[in-house]
Image (spheres, helix red, strand yellow):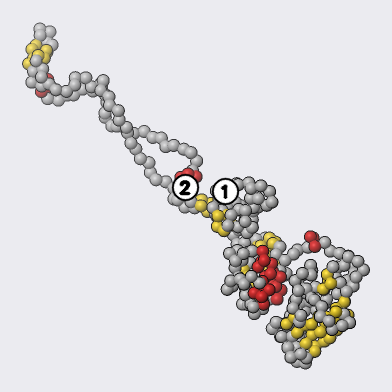
Amino acid sequence: MAGSINLSLSQQFDKLNGTLLSGGRLYFYAAGTDAPQNAYMDTGLTLVHPNPIILASDGRIPQLYFADGSIHVRLTDSGGVVQFDEDFVLVVGPSDGGGGGGGTSVDPTKIFQTGDILWLPTGVDRSGWVKSNGLTVGNSGSGATRANADCHFLFLYLYGTYDQTTCPVSGGRTGNAENDWTNGKTIATLDFREIMIGGMSEMGNSYRGGYGAVPTERYVSTTPAGIIGEITHPLTIAELAAHDHTGAGVTGDNNRGHTHGGGSLLDQVGGGTIAATAGGVFVVNAVNAGGSGATDDESQSHTHTFSTATVGSGAGHNNTPRTMMGTFYVKL
C-alpha cells in the first residue's frame, strides 16, 4: 500500500533569506542510502515523479506518495545549497499490515478520485475541486484559468480520458500528457453549463435507440461526453399532431330554382306571337328563343375555396423540464 510524508503540498522557503524556494530541488533516496528511490503522483504508485522534483515559482511541493516504510529526503536551492537532508522519514498512511504506515486500509472505492463529478445547488468554489465549466487548468506557468501544481492529476486524467474535441489542449496534443503539462500547455475541463445529464444508449447493454432521431450537438448518444438535444426547437409540420381544417363557403344569392323577370312578354319569349284565349290565358306561338326553359334541374360539378388567417410565430418550442440550478465540480 501507499502513504505520504508531511512535506506533501507544503511550501518551502530559502533558509538564508526567507524567500520562496523557486527552482528548489527535492531528491528522494532509499532510507539509509543515497540510492535514488521513486516518489509517485498517485496512490496506485504508477505515475512517477521526476527525481529531483524542481519546485515552481511558488515553492510548493506537489502531492507525494511512496511505498510503505521510510524514505531519505534532501532539499536544495537551485544552486545546490542544502536546505535540509533527512533520513528515515516515515511514510505515513494506510497499510494492509504492520508496515511503516500502520493503521487500517482504506477502500479506494469509497473516496473521491481525480475526475469525479459532483453537483451542488451552489455557486461557490470548493477546495480540492474546480468548476467544470469549460475553462482551463495547467501548471503554474501555463496561463490557464487555474494555473497551479494541484491541477497536475486532473490535467493527466482529462488528457487521457477525452479527445481534443471534448477537452482541447492549447496548441494541440503531442500525445505525451506529462510533457505537455511540463511545457505549460492548458487543457479545458468538460463544460456542464446549461447541461442536463443523461445515460448513454448502451452503457454495456444493448442499444435502446430512443435517442436515434434526437438532434446531436457533439457525437451521438453512445459516446461518453456526447451532447444531444436542444433547449428550444422550432416545430416542423411533420412534428405537429395529425389534424384537419374545416369551414364553409358562402355563394351569395345563387339558387338552382329561380325565375327570370323584367322586360315585356314579347322580350321574354323571344319575338314569338301571342294569342289570348277566352279565359285570359296567353298562348305563345312559334316561339323562337334560345336557352333552357327549366333552371331547377341544372347542376354542374364545382368546388368552393376558402382561406384561413395565419397563426403562430415559428419560434423555438421550449423543451426544458423544470430544473434546479447549481454547479458541477470536477475533482483535482
How packed is label 2: few (under 14 Cα within 10 Å), some, or many (20 or more)? few
Q: Residue drawn 60% across and 47% down? A: 209
Mark sitting on residue 184: none
Task: Find disc 2 in the rendering and name its residue.
Answer: 236
Residue 288 image offset from top left, x and y in percent: 10, 19
Q: Is 91 on the left-hand or right-hand side of 175? A: right
185 vs 283: above or below: below
Q: Looking at the rendering, which quadrant does residue 188 occupy?
A: bottom right
- In this view, the residue in front, 200 or 316, is 200
Q: How far apart are marks 2 and 1 (CA)?
A: 18 Å
Task: Find disc 1 in the rendering and name its residue.
Answer: 212
Quick check: can you spot residue 146? no
Callout 2: helix, strand or loop? loop
How packed is label 1: few (under 14 Cα within 10 Å), some, or many (20 or more)? few
Q: Residue drawn 82% across and 73% down? A: 66
Q: Looking at the rendering, which quadrant does residue 3 occupy?
A: bottom right
Q: Residue drawn 27% across and 26% down? A: 300
Q: Which image quarter is the N terminus in?
A: bottom right
Q: What residue type is labelled 2?
A: Thr
Q: Is 277 on the left-hand or right-hand side of 71? A: left
Total numbered badges shown on the rendered structure? 2
Could you tell which of marks 2 and 1 lies nearer the N-terminus?
A: 1
Residue 100 image offset from top left, x and y in percent: 90, 72
- In this view, the residue in front, 309 or 187, is 187
Could you tell me if the residues under marks 2 and 1 are in contact, i.e. CB atoms within 8 Å?
no
- In this view, the residue in front, 113 or 68, is 68
Q: Which image quarter is the C terminus in?
A: bottom right
